[in-house]
Amino acid sequence: MTLEAKAVLLTGASGGIGQALAQQLDQAGATLWLTGRNEAALKTLAAKLSRPAHIVIADLASNAGRQHLLENLGTQPLDAVVFAAGTNHFALLGDQNAEQLSQLINTNLLAPMQLTQSLLPRLSADARLLYIGSSLGAIGYPGFAAYGASKAGLRSFAQALRREWADSPRQVCHIAPRATQTEMNSTAMQQMNQQLKVKADSPQWVASQVLRQLQATQMHDQDLGYPEKLFIRINAVLPGVVDNAITSQLPVIKRYAKQNVSQALTTGEAL
Ligand SMILES: NC(=O)c1ccc[n+]([C@@H]2O[C@H](COP(=O)([O-])OP(=O)(O)OC[C@H]3O[C@@H](n4cnc5c(N)ncnc54)[C@H](OP(=O)(O)O)[C@@H]3O)[C@@H](O)[C@H]2O)c1
């Protein structure tokens, strides 16, 4: 599909992957609706684009925020929506409180589901919906139990919706990046990834994979990066093999998960 003059809504536009994607969508000629909570970041991003973009400041985890977005979308039907907004807390389950679990599920799973439902009357007849999940939504990983659960839910939601629309021209796909170099990864997460030799992709490359799907004749689900792509398949048929591989990493994971919690407390960041 050509993106020239197509109306595209991008959530999480102020984030690392979102900003890279907004620039690539702009280059491809799309008319953009950029949403996030960080107004300064969105304005700086919009100033870099070659054509005017619409900015809507909204907390998508709240009913009021989603309503505000809907009221500011204009009347043009949306040709594509990319759901990139998300949040992460790297901590062992015992170090997270109930509110943090709710925030993860709410932002990463319930909000995109509810937003999708509200957007149905606003979509063009052949609209494309693309959800950004995570490899951790297919491989349960210590320190990411709640994040992984939220992303596993999103994976399943996108798959079911694609099947629900199999008799229509609308398309749905899910892209699962592995670690990506954005602010979502705290210092402790980056140090753990380095020690465990986990590869991290650039947000520009991840954005290019999203763009490729949006432009394809037929969109397809994608798990990004080797060996994660392979582990996802092994995990589906032989989870015990992956259990053993992860158990050997457990002392390192636990150390950095604890470090992440104490660093967040010191800096005052939300976990
Ligand atoms: N970075 C990684 O390693 C990685 C790996 C796999 C998957 N992913 C997924 O890729 C997507 C993009 O992540 P990223 O790496 O670009 O992270 P990021 O730089 O932290 O950006 C996250 C984005 O989500 C938005 N967001 C968070 N909570 C929100 C809320 N309540 N309402 C509205 N917007 C909200 C943020 O907006 P504001 O800042 O304006 O609030 C920001 O635009 C996420 O879904 C993430 O789970 C990331």
Image (cartoon, grey):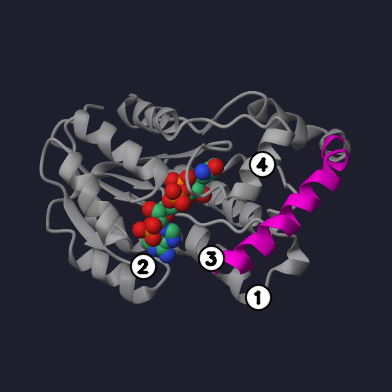
Residue at 82% over, 36% down: 242
- Pointers 1 and 2 in contact (C-beta within 8 Å): no
Quarter holding the N terminus? top left
Residue 246 in magenta stretch:
yes
Where 171 falls versus 2 (above or below)?
below
Q: Which residue is mark 3?
A: 269
Residue at 59% over, 57% down: 150
**Counting residues from the N terminus, which is met first, the one under dot 4 or under dot 2?**
2
Quarter holding the C terminus? bottom right
Ligand 1 within 8 angstroms of badge 3 C-beta: no
Residue at disc 3, secondary structure: loop
Label 4 vs label 2, nearer the camera: 4
Q: Which residue is mark 1?
A: 98
**Counting residues from the N terminus, which is met first, the one under dot 4 or under dot 1?**
1
Q: Which residue is mark 4?
A: 191
Give the distance between the C-alpha atoms of the residues marked 4 and 2, in whole angstroms. Answer: 30 Å
**Counting residues from the N terminus, which is met first, the one under dot 4 or under dot 3?**
4
Residue 213 in magenta stretch:
no
**Counting residues from the N terminus, which is met first, the one under dot 3 or under dot 2?**
2
Where 235 falls versus 158 (above or below)?
above
Give the distance between the C-alpha atoms of the residues marked 3 and 2, in whole angstroms. Answer: 18 Å
**Counting residues from the N terminus, which is met first, the one under dot 3 or under dot 1?**
1
Give the distance between the C-alpha atoms of the residues marked 4 and 1, in whole angstroms. Answer: 27 Å
Give the distance between the C-alpha atoms of the residues marked 1 and 2, in whole angstroms. Answer: 20 Å
- Dot 3 crowding, Cα within 10 Å, few <14, some 14–19, many 20+: few
Residue at disc 4, secondary structure: helix
Q: Which residue is mark 2?
A: 59
Question: What's the residue type where badge 3 is placed?
Answer: Glu
- Pointers 4 and 1 in contact (C-beta within 8 Å): no
- Viewer-nearest residue: 125 or 92: 92
